[in-house]
Image (cartoon, rainbow, N blue to C red):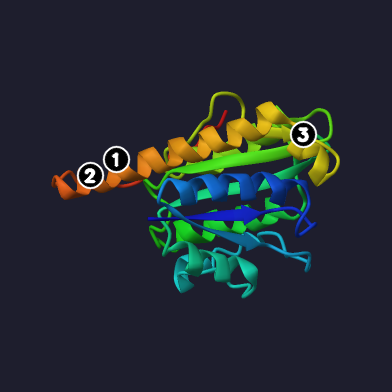
Amino acid sequence: MKVLLVNGSPHEKGCTYTALTEIAAQLEKEGVGAEIFQIGVRPLVPCMACRKCAELGKCVIDDRVNEFVETAAGFDGYVFGSPVHYAAASGVITPFMDRAFYSESAGKRNVFRLKPAAAVVCARRAGATAALDQLNKYFQISEMPVVSGRYWNMVHGNTPDEVRQDKEGMQNMRILAKNMAYLLKCKEAAAKAGITPLEREPVERTNFIR
């Protein structure tokens, strides 16, 4: 069992990384492998709505997004981390997740379905719950169990040292990791017992017009 943690901060080892490493360390204690995927700071083109991914099975723009989806296929769960910018997820992770989730779905890759996922955000002061709500929507539209902790999955601080001083926030990162590990072990036990996912229903689309 392995969990892929995505760092959506432009700072490779900043506040978001500090939260993710706390999760990764606890996952390892629970017997679950953990790896951090750094999106980086190279410009990411937003989704162009060209729908070529439906033909190609991947995004037509060949960059970190396609690399991530290929890598993610080999993992059992995911944590997406982001700093809070203007009460929203970062400008790094937003186009990244738009294209990753849309191209995966349109390309019928079936990488994410029924795999547990969690969002984690880091804020200096406020806007964290709005950013969390934004990120959780990617999971909810993809049939992914959303993993929670004892509180909203957030830490506070303006530097990694300040984040480490957020005792409640860091404790919640560990609780989140424990809950993720538990769900993964439940899935493994279910598979061994012969309990498999139900067949996916065909998509029904309804457009609302006046």
Q: Quadrant of the C terminus?
A: top right
Which residue occupies the foreground of this view, 73 or 200?
73
Asked if residue 89 is positioned above or below residue 55 in the image, the reply reads above
Which residue occupies the foreground of this view, 195 or 161?
161
Q: What's the residue type where badge 3 is placed? A: Gln
Label 2, secondary structure: give it. Answer: helix
Q: Is there any visible trace of residue 201 in the rendered image? A: no
* Residue 165 tag number: 3
Q: Which residue is mark 1?
A: 186
**Disc 1 versus disc 3: distance between alpha carbons?**
33 Å
Q: What's the residue type where badge 2 is placed? A: Ala
Residue at 74% of width from left, 39% of height from top?
Answer: 164
**Disc 2 versus disc 1: distance between alpha carbons?**
5 Å
Q: Position of residue 76 (x, y in %)?
A: 40, 54
- Do the residues under discs 2 and 1 have CB atoms within 8 angstroms? yes
Asked if residue 146 is positioned above or below residue 111 in the image, the reply reads above
Q: Quadrant of the N terminus?
A: bottom left
| Residue 10, picture quadrant | bottom right
Q: Nearer the viewer, mark 3 or mark 2?
A: 3
**Disc 3 versus disc 2: distance between alpha carbons?**
37 Å
From the viewer's perspective, tell me whether residue 110 is left or right of residue 46: left
Label 1, secondary structure: give it. Answer: helix
* Residue 189 tag number: 2
- Do the residues under discs 1 and 3 have CB atoms within 8 angstroms? no
Q: Is there any visible trace of residue 181 in the rendered image? A: yes
The residue carrying pointer 1 sits among few (fewer than 14), some (14 to 19) or many (20 or more) residues within 10 Å by Cα, namely few
Q: How many marks?
A: 3
Q: Position of residue 60 (x, y in %)?
A: 58, 72
The residue carrying pointer 2 sits among few (fewer than 14), some (14 to 19) or many (20 or more) residues within 10 Å by Cα, namely few
Q: What's the residue type where badge 1 is placed? A: Cys
